[in-house]
Structures are given as C-alpha cells and as structure tokens.
Image (cartoon, rainbow, N blue to C red):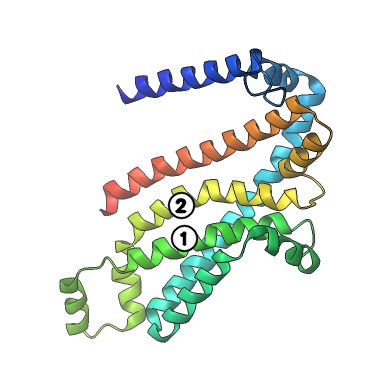
Amino acid sequence: MKVVYGVIGSVLLILAAELIGQFQLAGRAWPPLTDVLQYVATPAGASLVWRNSLVTLAAAAQGFVLGVAVAVIGAALALVVPLLRPGFDRFAAILHAVPTIALAPLLITTVGREDTPMVIAALSVGFVMFVTMTSGFAQTSTAHEDVFTVLGSGRVQRLARLELPQAVPAFFDGLTLAAPAAVLGATIGEWFGAPMGLGLVLVSAMQNYQMALLWAAALAATIMSLAAYLVFVQLQRLAVRRFA
C-alpha cells in the first residue's frame, strides 16, 4: 500500500504542477510541466541539460567521497584521542554556521572556480557525517566496553573491533542524508561562477528569463538528489539487517 500511496501522491503532484503552469496561477515564471519536458526532448535542450548534469554529478560525487572520508577520520580521531573531541566539535559547528554565500567567494579565490563546487559539497557532507558518526560511536554498550577493557584492548583495537561495527547503521543513516546534500552543495557552488554545471545553467536561465531551461535544470538536480537518496536508503536497509 505504501507504494500505491507513493504513486498516487506523485501523480497528484505532477498534475498540480501542470495545472498551475497551464492556468498561470503562479505567474509566467511557473511554466507547464509539459513545456519543460518538450524543451528537454529537443536535441539542444537535452544536450545542454545532460552535459551540465554530468558536471554537477562529478563535483557532487567527488565532494561526497571527500566529505565522508574526512568526517569519518575526524570522528575516529576524536574517539581515539578524547582531547581532540571538543576542538573538533566546535570547529565543525563553526564551519557549518558560516553561510555559503560568505564562504563561496573565499573558496573561489583559494581553490579556484572549478573546484569550489566540490569543496562546498564536501563541507555539506562533512558536517552531516561527522555528527552521525560521533553519535554512532557513542552507541556502544557499557557491557561491551567493559569486556574490551578487561581484555586489555587499546583504543585503536576497540575502535576497529567494537565502535566501527556498532556505528555501521549510523554510517548509512548519514549517507542517506549526505548524498542529497552533496548534490545541493555542488549546485550552489556552481551558482557562484563555475565554468559548467547545473548551478551555472540556473543562473544563466534566470538572468535571461528562459523558464523552460530554468525548470529543466532544477528538475535534473531534483532527480539526481532523489536518486542518490533512494540508492542509499536501500543500502541502509541492508546494513541495518546485517549490523543492527
């Protein structure tokens, strides 16, 4: 029944979007969905959206991998060396609190326009993963910790054999949230002047009042985020069955 309700909800949402565009209930800035699909069906429109979608996907994927790696390593270091935990927590909170609109110009002047989308995607992913991993490491039971203490295990051994396996469900929880955040971060990074990508297409289409192109790019980014989320939801379910 959940699948049926999901299909019904999706159909109603698509129908509502089409009717709003057809009757211009939200003005000319909201075109009918059929107009957007007709634009994407043209060779020029399909090529433009596809090429820029691949650029955004590449930046999001690179930022995703970088953000996950840094966050997991940081959370593990904070666990192995407890003195680092307060500093890491504050640094992550401060970095997350900085508005992207203030951070993007600094990144453009330091890492360059081409790498800014990847870095912003990594920052978006890193905070989510750091929080989920530190929470996952904290879920180990006191009884298990006592057993490892009695056996004389060091912090690294305890991390590898106790905390990491216990944190696997939390790790995949973080991935389901981080994957859409990576796409959003990459798109926002491209918004500030990347040479290619959906973010650049959104800015250009908005400035030139190309509503069909604007909505086509937004739809492509949405589909990309949704697909990434659904993939990691399935992986999360498998991980929960195995490790929970």
**Residue at horizontal 41%, vertical 86%?**
83
Horizontal side of residue 140 vs 198, given as left or right:
left
**Residue at horizontal 55%, vertical 50%?**
181
Horizontal side of residue 82 vs 97, given as left or right:
left
Write down the quadrant of residue 115 in the picture: bottom right
Q: Position of residue 228 (x, y in %)?
A: 52, 41
- Against 56, residue 218 (above or below) is above
Q: On the image, numbered disc 1 is attached to which residue? A: 129
The image quadrant where one finds the N terminus is top left
Q: Position of residue 95 (x, y in %)?
A: 57, 69
CA–CA distance between discs 1 and 2? 7 Å
Q: On the image, numbered disc 2 is attached to which residue? A: 175
**Residue at horizontal 72%, vertical 44%?**
199
Q: Position of residue 27 (x, y in %)?
A: 69, 23
The three-letter code of the residue at mark 2 reads Leu
Q: Nearer the viewer, residue 102 or 42?
A: 102
Disc 1 or 2, which lies upstream in sequence? Answer: 1
- The answer to whether the residues at label 1 and label 2 have Cβ atoms under 8 Å apart is yes
Q: Which mark is residue 76?
A: none
- Badge 1 density bin: few <14, some 14–19, many ≥20, Cα 10 Å: many
Write down the quadrant of residue 233 in the picture: top left
- Against 145, residue 43 (above or below) is above
